[in-house]
Amino acid sequence: MTQIALVTGSGSGIGRESAEALAVAGFHVVLTGRRESALLETQSLSAHGDRMTVISCDVTQPDSVDELFAKIESTHGRLDVLFNNAGTNVPAMTIDELSVDQWRQVIDVNLTGAFLTARGAFSLMRKQSPQGGRIINNGSISAHVPRPGSVPYTVSKHAITGLTRTLSLDGRPFNIACGQIDIGNTASDMTEQMSSGVPQADGSIKPEPTMDTAHVADAIVNMASLPLNANVQFMTIMATNMPFIGRG
């Protein structure tokens, strides 16, 4: 039986690359995100587009997320893997410079969105037969240590760790596994400035190395392909020489 995987934020970056890797590995992948055109582009660029379904969704809106999972259930009958990947950020600034709207923008997508999609996946996985599935949350290096001026992003990613741990515990009776991948410095739109220099903890500006997003996608496939009696609880994957170990 073909396994069904849902990837949020699959219109670009890590989400697009991971969706493609999951399709190559034999999953049928549900692509979701706010912009249907970007999702259709992900599908059209793939040699395995016939293994993809496009369902647009705003993960910050409960009704939109409920509709997403209703469509997954009616179309595919079940969900085996959720890669909870959608995320956003705002420019670096100290907390007194941060507006409430900017705070809410990041928290709504990174945390409330992750909660709503995990909630929908957990509900479907709990009631489907055979019961169970896997939720993979996109944490970040920022789930461990912050960059300067990153209050909303860092808070959201620390909270994702709490979500992962709680779902891991609460999912046990229902054969639902939950793990987290913490990613550092992939080459994407969000990391373009790293080659020219980013702020360091000592106040300096230095370039940082990045790694190919394909390595993250390979890690997601590895986590998603495990039997449900095995779980990667936390994985950190990063550019080898990024200033994480010893940061500060």
Image: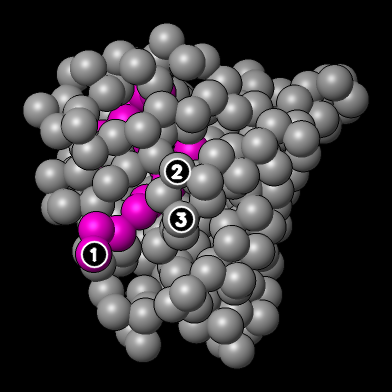
In the rendered view, would you say 158 is above or below 202? below
Where residue 168 appears, x then y in whole percent?
57, 78
- The residue that mark 1 highlights is 1
**Helix, strand or loop for disc 2:** helix
Do labels 1 and 3 touch, CB within 8 Å?
A: no
The disc labelled 2 sits on which kind of residue?
Thr
Instruction: Give the CA distance from mark 1 to mark 3.
Output: 12 Å
Label disc, if present, on residue 126 of the rendered structure: none
Residue 231 seen: yes
Which residue is found at the position 39% from the left and 39% from the top?
A: 30
**Residue extending furthest front?**
74
C-alpha gap between disc 2 and disc 3 = 6 Å
* Residue 137 picture location, percent across and down: 50, 56
The answer to whether marks 2 and 3 mark residues whose Cβ atoms lie closer than 8 Å is yes
Which residue is painted at 77% across and 39% down in the image? 62
Tell me the amino acid under the disc marked 3: Gly
Quadrant of residue 39 within the rendered picture: top left
Q: Amino acid at mark 1?
A: Met
In percent of width and height, residue 131 lies at: 49, 77
Quarter of the picture containing the N terminus is bottom left
Reading the image, the residue beneath label 3 is: 77
Q: Which residues are magenta?
A: 1-18
Q: Which residue is mark 2?
A: 75
